[in-house]
Image (spheres, rainbow, N blue to C red):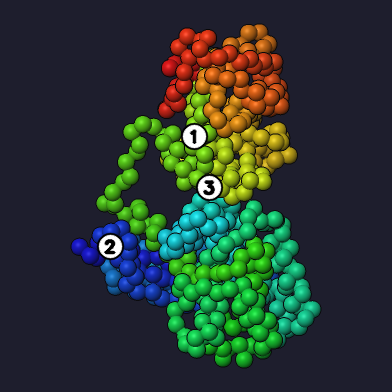
Amino acid sequence: MAAARRLAAIDVGSNSIRLVVAEVQDDGAYRVLDEERAMTRLGQGLLETGRLASETMGRTLEVIGKMKKIAAGFHVVDLRAVATSAVREAENGEAFRREAWRQHRVRIEVISSEEEARLAFLSAIRRFNLEGQSIAVADIGGGSLEVVLAAGSVVDRVHPLALGAVRLTERFVRSDPLKPKHWKALKRAIDEALRAEIGKPPFTVDVIVGSGGTFSALGGMIRYEREGSEGNPHGYTMSRAEVTRLLARLRELPLDARKQLPGLPPARADIIVAGAAAVARLTRHLGARHIIVNEGGVRDGLILSMLAELPGTPAVPAPATGRLDAVLAFARKCRSNERHGEHVARLAGELFDALGRRYKMPAEARELLVASAMLHDIGFLINHQGHHKHAYHLIMHSDLAGFSAREIELIANVVRYHRRALPTKKHDNYRRLPKDDRRLVRKLAGILRVAVALNRSHTQVITGLRAVVRRDRLRVTAVADREPAVELWDVRRKAALLEQVFRTRLSVRWRPAAEIAGGGPLRLVRGGRGAGGGR
């Protein structure tokens, strides 16, 4: 019975290969039965030739065979092997995969940088309590560095960078110890890559959770400096100042001296300067003061993913009331103003019902609009400035149960344009949408802008709308117990997009609730209703 609950994962990196064999526990966690790692330098020379060298391929295939035998000894029910940047980029990467299958019957899956980042992030949030903090999860290998920016467990951005320890060493480490001119070139290249890919960070990072051999080596060396003992650096916290000081020391030591440093594996001594430089410059760029070492990383995330897919794992039941519950749960996770979001959703739905009948908008678009309204302010979790842009990234990296990838992208774009700039093909997120979807985004964003304006004071003073389209005019009656002066003022400022896309003129007037029979709070309709969605 225990053997049927055992899994194994092999991470074929550009610098090293790692195996973990795990046994699933009754509580859904797992315990490690065995681990193995080998530094085969699969990506060595790739930058110059564009190909995996025969020698490194041979070494790597031999290790893969040994790791499969280790896993087989534990009678694992499933073994999954993934490869990262070296196999992803090499001209003969597919040939390497074929050989792994021919020689050892190991099917290697090449994963994207984004998937690497997702697995490292999954490991980080599972292993450490990061709620309430602005974090970065960084996974560095031989060929690449993946960075995830997140608020607690909510992903904001994913940044893949070609800043792996082997790649940087081959490009810039031209002297031993490193001469000042070579150090300046290395530092400049890292900084330029960080500025080009990440730019100005959306927030100051409280802590970086780092996985990969470079982080482990830095943690091991700093631990020895502090405590005079070597040991597993998992969970060890380093300060930015400590990493900076250690890097300065590593730059001055020749290779033979670096190989003698306690806590640094000798086989990593030749690439540690470049790897440490990438970590130090990233930490500086993000403004982080502390780094936590995560020994798990991609392979841990891989096991966690496999565990979730294991046959017999109880599936999470779908919400009985519809997929908007997933939207509400995500809004709460982002600590948004739930009352404001739901009220804007009600008002947006009323506007959609009037316009949808007249302009024959697709029925399913109503639910996308309601979802967008509920999520429009979640970007405040990251930063007030540019919160509409932050919301776009948060939604794009979310997993809204029941919504397709296309629908999630539509919701993200509608939210992106609920304020400030109009949708334009100058923006990558908008340009890559199909023409019909771009048209729909403009319509829904136009409605959402007006709905947000109708609760500008966040007091829910407008309890309902009566909207009628006649010829080229949209006439809206706002029902409220008192004059919603702020809302009427803001609607006049925010109506331009709606008027443009629907080719109509918007007029809004106020009437007291007492004058309208049956006036009162509107209900948020869950699930897909038609454009004329009844109440």
Helix, strand or loop for disc 2 = loop
Nearer the camera: disc 1 or disc 3: 1
Residue 470 lies, in percent from the top left, at 63, 8
Relative horizontal placement of residue 111, taking residue 453 as reference (left or right)? left
Toward the left, the furthest residue is 1
Read off the residue under disc 1: 339
Helix, strand or loop for disc 3 = loop
In-front residue for pair 272/66: 272
Mark 3 packing: few (<14 Cα in 10 Å), some, or many (20+)?
some
Mark 1 packing: few (<14 Cα in 10 Å), some, or many (20+)?
few
**Residue type of the residue flagged with mark 2:** Gln
Image height check: is 464 above or below 54? above
Read off the residue under disc 2: 25
Of the numbered discs in the image, which one, if any, rests on residue 397?
Answer: 3
Residue 62 lies, in percent from the top left, at 45, 75
Q: Quadrant of the C terminus?
A: top left
Of the numbered discs in the image, which one, if any, rests on residue 310?
Answer: none
First in sequence, mark 1 or 3: give its number: 1
Relative horizontal placement of residue 369, taking residue 192 as reference (left or right)? left
Asked whether the viewer can see residue 352, the reply is no
**Residue type of the residue flagged with mark 1:** Arg
Image height check: is 521 above or below 220? above
Helix, strand or loop for disc 1 = helix
The CA span between labels 1 and 3 is: 24 Å
Q: Residue at x 62, y 38 (%)?
A: 416
Q: In which quarter of the view is residue 453 placed?
A: top right
Image height check: is 314 above or below 453? below
**Residue type of the residue flagged with mark 3:** His
In-front residue for pair 496/38: 496
In-front residue for pair 226/531: 226
Toward the front, the furthest residue is 482
